[in-house]
């Protein structure tokens, strides 16, 4: 992608009503970026805003994804397992991947945790122990995240998977660190994460990579 201002974009957002997803939405709105937001129930819909278009429905439904992505320039997913839907990320991505190809949308950014391990990782002991714990106690979640990585890495999208440690739900801005081999810390401010996600919409630096972030 060429450098541009995200104020000229329309971004499809999945998981934008979740705890960390709300910070991403807020960051985009502050930047004047238009959003199409997938919302499962009316109770979760945000207050009306001129920059937000709400699309009602589940990410598991192909038609909903098609409506969400129509007219968009990029896709951000902050989806995570909830309500027993441990396969939601890979199920949604299969629909997203198909529709993005149909609509010629290239840029896809996803948030994941430290449980996702990919080639090129060189983790320290603490990071490896955290990944082991996640895999031991949440194997279905790790399986789902690994499948999303496999889908993306075998395809042609310009994707980035941002791997996060514990997300602190705060508007505090700190010194965000990024590393491709190991987590540079074990907490990240949700506001820092939102700003990093937005910055990646116009950056080529981490395309088809899985950077760790911490602050």
Image (cartoon, grey):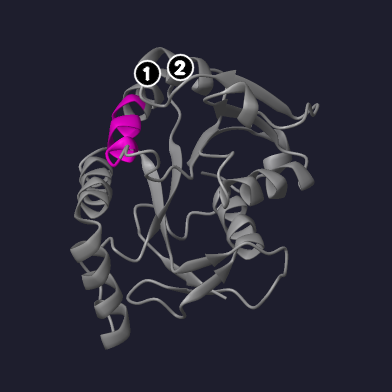
The image shows residue 181 at horizontal and vertical percentages of 32, 75
- Can I make out residue 94 in this image? yes
- What residue sits 37% from the left and 44% below the top? 81
Magenta span covers which residues? 86-95
Q: Are marks 2 and 1 in contact (CB under 8 Å)?
A: yes
Q: Looking at the image, is 186 positioned above or below residue 204?
A: below
- What residue sits 26% from the left and 87% below the top? 125
Q: CA distance from mark 2 to mark 1?
A: 5 Å
- What residue sits 64% from the left and 78% below the top? 175
Q: Which residue is mark 2?
A: 64
- Can I make out residue 156 in this image? no
Pick whichever, 113 or 81, lies toward us.
81
Q: Residues within 10 Å of mark 1 (few under 14, many from 20)?
A: few
Q: Which residue is mark 1?
A: 61
The image shows residue 20 at horizontal and vertical percentages of 57, 52
Q: Is residue 149 left or right of residue 182?
A: left
Q: Is residue 91 magenta?
A: yes
- The overriding secondary structure of the stretch rendered in magenta is helix
Q: Residues within 10 Å of mark 2 (few under 14, many from 20)?
A: some
The image shows residue 112 at horizontal and vertical percentages of 39, 55
Quadrant position of residue 56:
top right
């Amino acid at each position: 992608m060429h450098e541009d201002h995200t104020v000229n974009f329309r971004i499809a957002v999945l998981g934008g009503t979740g705890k960390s997803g709300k910070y991403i939405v807020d960051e985009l709105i502050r930047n004047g970026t238009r959003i199409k937001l997938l919302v499962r129930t009316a109770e979760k819909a945000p207050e009306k805003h001129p920059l937000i278009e709400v699309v009602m429905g589940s990410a598991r439904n192909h038609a909903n994804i098609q409506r969400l992505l129509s007219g968009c320039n990029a896709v951000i997913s902050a989806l995570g397992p909830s309500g027993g839907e441990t396969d939601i990320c890979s199920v949604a991505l299969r629909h997203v991947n198909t529709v993005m190809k149909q609509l010629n949308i290239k840029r896809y950014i996803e948030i994941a945790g430290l449980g996702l391990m990919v080639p090129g990782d060189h983790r320290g002991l603490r990071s490896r122990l955290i990944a082991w714990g996640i895999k031991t106690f949440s194997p279905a979640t790790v399986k789902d995240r690994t499948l999303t990585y496999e889908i993306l890495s075998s395809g042609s999208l310009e994707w980035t998977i941002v791997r996060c440690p514990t997300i602190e739900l705060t508007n505090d801005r700190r010194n965000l660190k990024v590393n491709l081999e190991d987590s540079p810390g074990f907490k990240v401010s949700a506001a820092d994460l939102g700003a990093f996600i937005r910055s990646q919409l116009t950056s080529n630096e981490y395309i088809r990579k899985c950077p760790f972030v911490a602050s």
